[in-house]
Amino acid sequence: MSMAATAEFASAPDAPAAAPVDLGGRCDIMPGSPLPDLDSPGGEAFVARVRRDRKSDQFAIIVDGRVPARIEALPAFRGMEHPNVLRVLDWGTVDWPLEDRRRFAIVFERPAGRRLMESLDDVREPLPDDVIVRGLLPAMLSVLRDMNMRGVTSGALRPTNLFFRDPASGGIVLGDCVSSPAGYGQPLLLETIERGMAQPSGRGPGLISDDLYALGVTLLILSLGRNPLRGMEEDAALRAKMDKGTYPALTAGVRVPQSLIEPLRGLMADDGKQRWSLSDLEMWLQGRRLSPKQPQVPRRGARPFEFGGDEHWHCRALARGMAANPAAAAPVIERGDLDKWLRRSLGDEARADLVQNAIDSASIGGRGSNQEDRTVARVVTALDPPAPLRYRGIAVMPDGVGTALAEAVCTGASVQPLAELILAQLPMFWVSCQTDFRAEHVPLVQLFDLQRTLLEHTGPGFGIERLLYELNPACPCQSPLVRDQHVLTMAELMAALNTVAARPARGRDPMDRHIAAFIAAQHKKINDQFFTALTSADPARRMTATLRILAEVQNRFGPANLPQLCDWLVSMMEPAFKRFKHRPTREKLKEEARLLAREGVIEKLVRLVDNPDAIRHDDKGFLMAIRQHEALTKEIHRLEARIRTGGSAAEGTGRRVAAVISNLLAMGGLILTVVMMAG
């Protein structure tokens, strides 16, 4: 460990109170030693120490939980032992004392040098051309090529996420790309126009082509030593890129180094098909000169379309304006003004036909109060197909719906617009509008067709909660019961419920909508009928369904012993006990259940109260008692009738009276028996 790191351990003012936090017995994280210079959009940084590595320094990002980390990409990044990427060393869930809850932590190799830029508003010494061409550019090309081979993207390539490896060598490393979704912490300036129009949580993983665009903007900023649009609002910067194209908008009024003009034009091309690929960039570095890329200027109309107080000359700007004000856009679309402008002023018959198709198909999902919103959402997609889906204030790329939903749930925002977006089949319409149909669109359509089906089923184990976990396999369970324990797996869920069961205020039921959906998404082999039974009007059937679901999970994923959870379940099993009519049997079952709870095996509780043979035997005994009751009742009525009709002598009368009394006594005993069975 370096002297600087040792000093940080020793100088932390609250080090005695903030003991090291253990990560799986492999690493210690120091809550009393924050590293604000290494904070990330995904969370705060703290000193860490990998126990088997005493030669290098490490730090950990404690993921703040607003959005899920890229857990599915962590193995790929750990496998990248690349000199120009900050190495991912370890990860896992820890008990975080600063918040008194469990948090996800990611441990990285710690760079010895500082960031190239602390903020995009900074002004620094421009990087020399030869440093960029011979150092930074080849290094980042190699990084992106490695990522592409592993099937991941960076989504975080920017000047503020590049570090000097150490003060002496001048080597540069790319920082954290995994503590938040791709593009989540990326400034709009570094995103393509389409991704820049999406909300940060809804940009999706993107493509290597998007990272190449970010590389081009990064090179320009570092070569100038400043952001060329410094001081400009993000909305104005996006509008400038839309109207002029990225390269003209960012290079207007600045002197671009002659040696970088060609790669910057190629990397910052707004048309993804025209943008340089990894191979193009490699060929340029090898000395081959490529055809110059001309900026793609949007097709302009002969006259502007006036909407919202602005003049819109092209479809992209108009679509953005209409998406921002759907209430005003709906009557304009209905009157046919848009169709006339597209055909007469813009001269784009194909676009006009696509817009008409959007209007005609807007009734999908049923008519209702949001009919106008659906119409506008489809029309703006038809006007600007590569742009994100925009509906009722949200803007998401189709492959970013999942992370946008996770952010909404984790922050308590409304999930209704996202649910309506899927039910209205807007992702499928987006795919149908694309002129550049890609192979990845096919599974995207299949995915959202399945999600729509799950969303239409509103019972436990389905609905918007199920969508959350299907679209975000690495999202922790958001049930209020276990949210503070950052549950990621089935085994962790069961252990967390066992912990909750030991609390005085444990709640009424260990099965809520989030827990049911989390289990259904992660345990595909479980019988869906169990979840359907959770909505049964019969309390005993509901209770048995809860037992069966939790027993299935414990049997497959563990832990083997859950005594506190079993005790909680026994306290809820009264409806299941009441299925047995015989009171002594019920009392015996209750006692057996209390004993079984100590063993901590839920399956044994299921076998106890959901035993078909025992239930049939109890029902048979109850039926026999009822039949005997009915037979004796008939006999009593017969004897009473004979008494009323008179009959024979006093002796005979006495015998009949005695018989009646005898039957009444027998009847009383039988009634007592039935009452005892019925409870």
Image: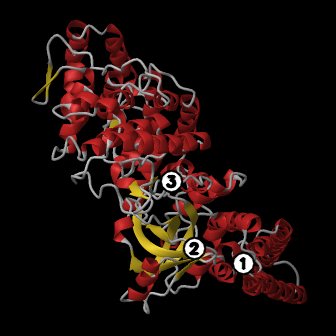
Give the residue type that dot 1 points to.
Ala
Instruction: State the residue position of label 2.
Output: 55
**Which residue occupies the foreground of this view, 497 or 455?**
497
Badge 3 local density, few (<14 within 10 Å), some, or many (20+)?
A: many
What is the spatial separation of the Cα atoms under label 1 and label 2, in whole angstroms? Answer: 74 Å
Is 203 placed above or below 335 here? below
Image x and y of residue 280, in percent: 48, 27
Three-letter amino acid code at the position of disc 3: Val
Whole-percent x, y for residue 45 in the image: 41, 69
Mark 3 or 2: the one toward you: 2
Residue ID for mark 1: 678
Which residue is disc 3 drawn over? 85
- Label 2: element kind: loop
The residues bearing labels 3 and 2 have C-alpha atoms spaced at a distance of 18 Å
Query: Is disc 1 in contact with disc 3, using a CB cutoff of under 8 Å?
Result: no
Do the residues under discs 1 and 2 have CB atoms within 8 angstroms? no
Task: Tell me the number on the disc at residue 659.
Answer: none
Q: Position of residue 546 (x, y in %)?
A: 65, 66
Direction from residue 461 to residue 158 in the image, left or right: left
Q: Secondary structure at mark 1?
A: helix
Q: Quadrant of residue 614?
A: bottom right
Q: Quick check: can you spot residue 317?
A: no
Which is nearer the N-term, disc 1 or disc 2? 2
Report the residue that reaches farthest toward the bottom. Answer: 16
The residue shown at (58%, 64%) is 89
Q: What residue lies at 55% left-to-right and 39% top-to-bottom?
A: 145
**What type is the residue that disc 2 sits on?**
Lys
Near-viewer residue (535 or 163) = 163
Q: Is residue 606 visible?
A: yes
Q: Nearer the viewer, residue 248 or 114?
A: 114
- Sort mark 2 into few (<14), some (14-19) or many (20+) by Cα contacts within 10 Å: few
> What residue lies at 15% left-to-right and 32% top-to-bottom?
253
